[in-house]
Image (cartoon, helix red, strand yellow):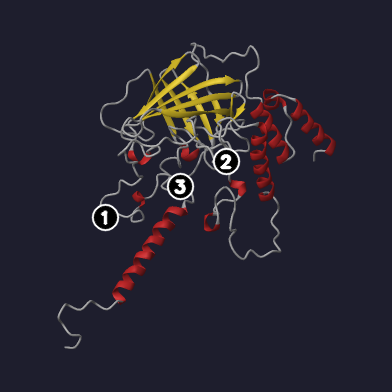
């Protein structure tokens, strides 16, 4: 067991050292609070030291390999209470402090002597009532505000208001839908989302655009001569970027679209088209093109920039940016199918609703034909 004076000395060391020194030499953490401090130091020390140069592979390509995470308290769009893209340190500290308090409350031991009479009205992070499916131990949405070039950001989007631009007149966003006429969402497994079916990541974790989720926000980048592979922790997706290739023209729309890439100096540029409808981004898919740029900007930071272009949906391209941070952990298997009771329970519940509706219909008296009396 660690002595109190050792714990105090460790905390002081973390506060006094930079992000790189912390990641390489900090001793084992003795509490969740110390981990908060480490994350703060890493986030605020996100600017490259003087004279630092991005590493290269043996053939001169930028070295982007390793494990990365985009877990963050910052979201794609800007919350209404913020007017500017860059937050003050006071605003960022308030957001992080509020999250710390939430985590501390959720990490308190449960009193077994108290009887839980009902589900929580509000269990945090936008969930309440029967939607309180995960307790805090199973989530990892991030503990710090996203910083780019050391600046705390209010949103990933860099549009003037931090929101998705309005669509062109007459443009209609594509729904997830695509179901045949007459088929309902809960009739068959195919009507449910790809994540519920354990086929692809939930939301846009794999991308493009790559966005963090409630948990499992780790990625492994592997570079080969003609390909770049990005292993996504959520639902074990693997994005394959074909370097120096051309987009396919056979009409096939693969999961995560068709990604080709090239290098521009220290930057990997990835262009993706041919999105499947079920992976529409912000309602665009058929004519959508997403351009991503990956640039290592500090020993433990990689700048990620994205541009959305669909002339049938928006008048002009738009986009945003954030920074991945190096992850000390590896990417482990996400065994989505194991114990996936959610999908079968959803479909079972729908079948029970069908049964109840059929019984109710059978119990109702038949309508009488017009002009006929009710007596024989």
To which residue does mark 3 refer? 337
| Helix, strand or loop under label 2 | loop
| Name of the residue lying farthest toward the right | 5
To which residue does mark 2 refer? 81
Q: Residues within 10 Å of mark 3 (few under 14, many from 20)?
A: few
Vertical arrangement, residue 7 with respect to residue 109, above or below: above
Report the residue at 59% width, 23% height from top: 149
**Position of the N terminus by quadrant:** top right
Q: Position of residue 84 (x, y in %)?
A: 56, 32
Vertical arrangement, residue 218 with respect to residue 179, above or below: above
- Of label 2 and label 1, which has the lower sequence position? 2
Tag in front: 2 or 1: 2
Question: Would you identify the image quadrant in which residue 173 lies?
Answer: top left
Give how far apart the Cα atoms at labels 3 and 1 are.
29 Å
- Of label 3 and label 1, which has the lower sequence position? 1
Q: Position of residue 38 (x, y in %)?
A: 69, 32
Give how far apart the Cα atoms at labels 2 and 3 are.
40 Å
Residue 182's disc number: 1
Tag in front: 3 or 1: 1
In the rendered view, does 46 fall on the left or right side of 203? right
């Amino acid at each position: 067991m660690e002595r109190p004076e050792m714990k105090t000395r460790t905390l002081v060391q973390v506060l006094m050292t930079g992000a790189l020194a912390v990641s390489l030499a900090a001793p084992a953490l003795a509490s969740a609070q110390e981990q908060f401090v480490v994350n703060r130091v890493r986030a605020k020390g996100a600017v490259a030291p003087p004279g630092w140069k991005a590493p290269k592979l043996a053939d001169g390509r930028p070295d982007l390999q390793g494990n990365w995470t985009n877990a963050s308290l910052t979201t794609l769009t800007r919350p209404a209470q913020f007017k500017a893209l860059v937050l003050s340190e006071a605003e960022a500290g308030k957001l992080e402090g509020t999250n710390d308090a939430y985590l501390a409350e959720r990490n308190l031991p449960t009193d077994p002597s108290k009887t839980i009479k009902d589900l929580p009205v509000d269990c945090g992070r936008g969930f309440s009532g029967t939607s309180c499916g995960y307790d805090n131990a199973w989530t990892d949405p991030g503990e710090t505000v996203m910083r780019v070039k050391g600046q705390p950001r209010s949103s990933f989007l860099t549009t003037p208001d931090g929101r998705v631009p309005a669509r062109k007149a007459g443009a209609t966003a594509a729904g997830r839908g695509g179901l045949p006429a007459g088929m309902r969402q809960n009739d068959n497994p195919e009507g449910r989302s790809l994540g519920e079916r354990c086929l692809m990541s939930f939301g846009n974790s794999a991308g493009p655009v790559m966005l963090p989720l409630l948990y499992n926000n780790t990625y492994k980048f592997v570079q080969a001569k003609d390909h770049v592979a990005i292993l996504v922790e959520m639902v074990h997706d693997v994005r394959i970027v074909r370097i120096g290739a051309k987009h396919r023209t056979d009409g096939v729309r693969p999961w995560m679209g068709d990604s080709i890439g090239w290098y521009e100096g220290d930057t990997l540029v990835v262009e993706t088209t041919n999105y499947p409808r079920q992976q529409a981004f912000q309602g665009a898919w058929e004519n959508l093109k997403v351009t991503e740029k990956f640039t290592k900007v500090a020993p433990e930071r990689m700048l990620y920039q994205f541009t959305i272009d669909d002339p049938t949906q928006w008048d002009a391209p738009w986009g945003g940016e954030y920074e991945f941070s190096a992850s000390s952990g590896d990417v482990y298997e996400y065994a989505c199918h194991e114990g996936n009771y959610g999908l079968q329970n959803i479909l079972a519940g729908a079948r029970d609703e069908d049964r109840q509706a059929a019984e109710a219909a059978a119990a109702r008296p038949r309508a009488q034909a017009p002009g006929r009396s009710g007596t024989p």
